[in-house]
Image (cartoon, rainbow, N blue to C red):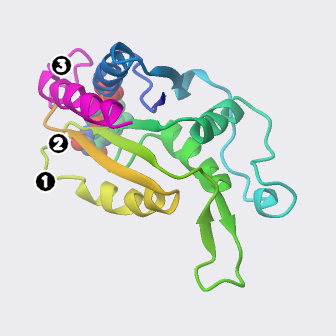
Amino acid sequence: MKVVNILGSPRINGTSARIAKTFIDEAERLGAESESYYLNGMKFKGCQGCEQCHSKSDKCILQDDLENVLEALHSSDIAIFSSPVYYGDVSGQFKMFFDRTWSLVDVNYDNEMPFSTRLPEDKTAIFLLSQGDYAEKHTDIIERYKPYFELYGYELTVIRATGLTSGDPAADVSDWQAKMTDLAQSLVNAN
Ligand SMILES: Cc1cc2nc3c(=O)[nH]c(=O)nc-3n(C[C@H](O)[C@H](O)[C@H](O)COP(=O)(O)O)c2cc1C
C-alpha cells in the first residue's frame, strides 16, 4: 500500500504538515510506503489551459516538478491533500497544484456525463485543512472542492483543524493527530 502526502503549506513543520505526518508515521508503522511532496519547495507552473491533456496526451504535457506528483496519484492507494486556509481558500501553492489535476480527468463532450476519472478505482483521499478561525467558518471550501475529489473517484475523508488562533506553527494539534492515527489504522488495515 502506498500513501502520497501532498503538503500545501509553506510551513514545512506547520500544523497541517504535522497532522499529515502523524498519518504517515502510523501508516508506515503498519507497513505502508509513503512519498511526501512539499509543494512550496517545488518548481512548477499553474495549469496553462492548453487542453493538451484532453487532445494530444492522457497526461499533463508540462514538464516540471509536478510530473512526479501527478504520477504518484496514479500509483498510490491513499492521498493526503493538505493546505492552510489563506483568505478563505486553500493556499496559492495548493491551488496551482490542484488546477493541474485537471489532467486526471478524461473529457468526452459527446457523453451525457462528459467527465470521467483517469485514476484507478478504490482510492482514498484525505482533504486536510488548517485554519485560524473557528469551525463554523470556511466550510464552503469543503463544499467547493469535494465535487472534484469525487470526480477523480476518491472516497473522501475531510479533516479540519480549526480555531488555531495563535497562528503558531507549533500549536497543539494533538486532537487532530489522534484522529489521523485512528484513520490510518482503519484505512491501512482495511487494505
Ligand atoms: C496569508 C494568510 C492568510 C490567512 N487567511 C486565513 C483565513 O482566511 N481564515 C483563517 O481561518 N485563517 C487564515 N490564516 C491562518 C492560517 O490558516 C492558520 O495559521 C493555519 O493554521 C496555518 O496552517 P499551517 O500551520 O499548516 O501553515 C491565514 C494565514 C496567512 C499567513
Answer whether labels 1 and 2 touch (C-beta < 8 Å). yes
Q: Is residue 118 above or below residue 3?
A: below
Q: Quadrant of the C terminus?
A: top left
**Residue at mark 3: C-beta within 8 A of ligand 1:** yes
Answer whether labels 1 and 3 touch (C-beta < 8 Å). no
Q: Which residue is mark 1?
A: 136
- The quadrant in which residue 84 appears is top left
User: Which one is closest to the eye, mark 3 or mark 2?
Assistant: 3
User: Secondary structure beneath disc 3?
Assistant: loop
N-term-proximal mark, 3 vs 2: 2
Q: Which residues are magenta?
A: 165-191
N-term-proximal mark, 1 vs 3: 1
Label 1 – label 2 distance at C-alpha: 8 Å
Name the residue type under label 1: Glu
In the shown orientation, is residue 128 left or right of residue 80? left
In the shown orientation, is residue 13 left or right of residue 41? left
Q: Is residue 85 visible?
A: no
Question: Residue drawn 66% across and 83% down?
Answer: 111
